[in-house]
Image (spheres, rainbow, N blue to C red):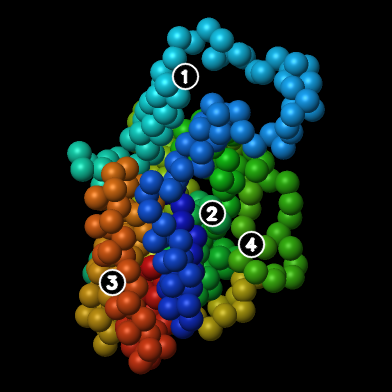
Amino acid sequence: MGIRVHWFALALSFPALHAHAHSAARVARAPLVARTGIARVAVRCAAKGGGTGTGGDEGARAAAGSRGGLRLLEWVPSQQLLVLTAKWVWRTLFRVMLSELAPQSDAGAYMRPTPQAGANAAPDGRWPASLPHPEPGRYHLYVGNACPWCHRAIIAGSLKGLFGSGLVGISVLLDDPQKASRGGWAFEHRTSSTAMPTEIASIWDLAIRHDPLFGAADLRGVYDGLSEGSYTGRCTAPLLVDLKDVRIVSSESAEIVRLLGALDAPSSGPRVNVAVIDLYPEALRTAIDAANEWIYTEVNNGVYQCGFATQQGAYEQAEQKLHAALERLDAMLASSKFVAGAQITQGDSLP
């Protein structure tokens, strides 16, 4: 999505999860009211005129030579009115921004929007019969490095050795809300600017920095092109696209992980040298599904519910649930290297 929290996506993918989780947890414990505390202190200090570091005659001379900004206190009838108005404007703008980026309940709790486009990946881990058979150059993934939902797709594709194999292409987006016309994702280039490197050091060496389909300036341009200019929803990443049929395959990260997990890379190609594994082995599917369900609800989405809560009660409820889930994960990983058993699976890449 357009709003992004980095730590949990990668932390839950490695054995040292609990160390990362508690580090992030300390940040989450800060009261909700602290988020606007700095602004309030600044308003109070400005109104009182303190903190200049001058005094006596020196302070008087400095004041005489200064215009004092807009001199609002000279024509506003009440200093209290000025401060209250500033607070109201700040809070109103903050709530309007959050209502656009992070929908809220009446109680101030974050309500995650439902996925907008999906392919309904088969639960048996196989490529859906409703989708065209994978072929080189057909499917393309759009991701941003600043998004944990993109991280899970990147992890899954990397573990399967798909990127650089020619089977699945990948474009990396910039997190730039000023450059993007909607959302926050934009492309660094409009057309191809660099050739594929001969030596592959990481997944980023396999990615392109432009849109291969429409040459769009941002992700909104891709969504508009795929819908012939009629798209009105959120422009989110990750996004998996069928380049041949020019259509969206899925914009739901968990589903994209399952789709990528159903693919096997060709035996040759300039891909990163990794051991290709089964991310959804039949013997562990029950455990994987169970772990995915509660980790997504209580940890992945729990972080967002803490970060985007607009009322103290909603924040405290979300924070308590999140830390209870982190303690549950600590206990789980104390006795097992991976979430769902003795090998890395979707249960580790989905978070």
Real-space Cα separation, disc 3 to disc 4, in angstroms? 35 Å
| Secondary structure found at label 3 | helix
* Residue beneath disc 3: 324
Real-space Cα separation, disc 2 to disc 4, in angstroms? 13 Å
Q: Amino acid at mark 4?
A: Trp
* Residue beneath disc 1: 79
Q: Amino acid at mark 1?
A: Gln
Residue 216 at what x, y percent from top left? 56, 36
* Residue beneath disc 2: 146
> Looking at the image, is mark 2 or mark 1 earlier in the sequence?
1
How packed mark 3 is, by other alpha carbons closer than 10 Å (few <14, some 14-19, many 20 or more), is few
Q: Amino acid at mark 3?
A: Ala
Location of residue 64 (image quadrant)? top right
How packed mark 2 is, by other alpha carbons closer than 10 Å (few <14, some 14-19, many 20 or more), is some
Real-space Cα separation, disc 2 to disc 3, in angstroms? 26 Å
Real-space Cα separation, disc 1 to disc 3, in angstroms? 45 Å
What mark, if any, has residue 204 been given in the picture? Answer: 4
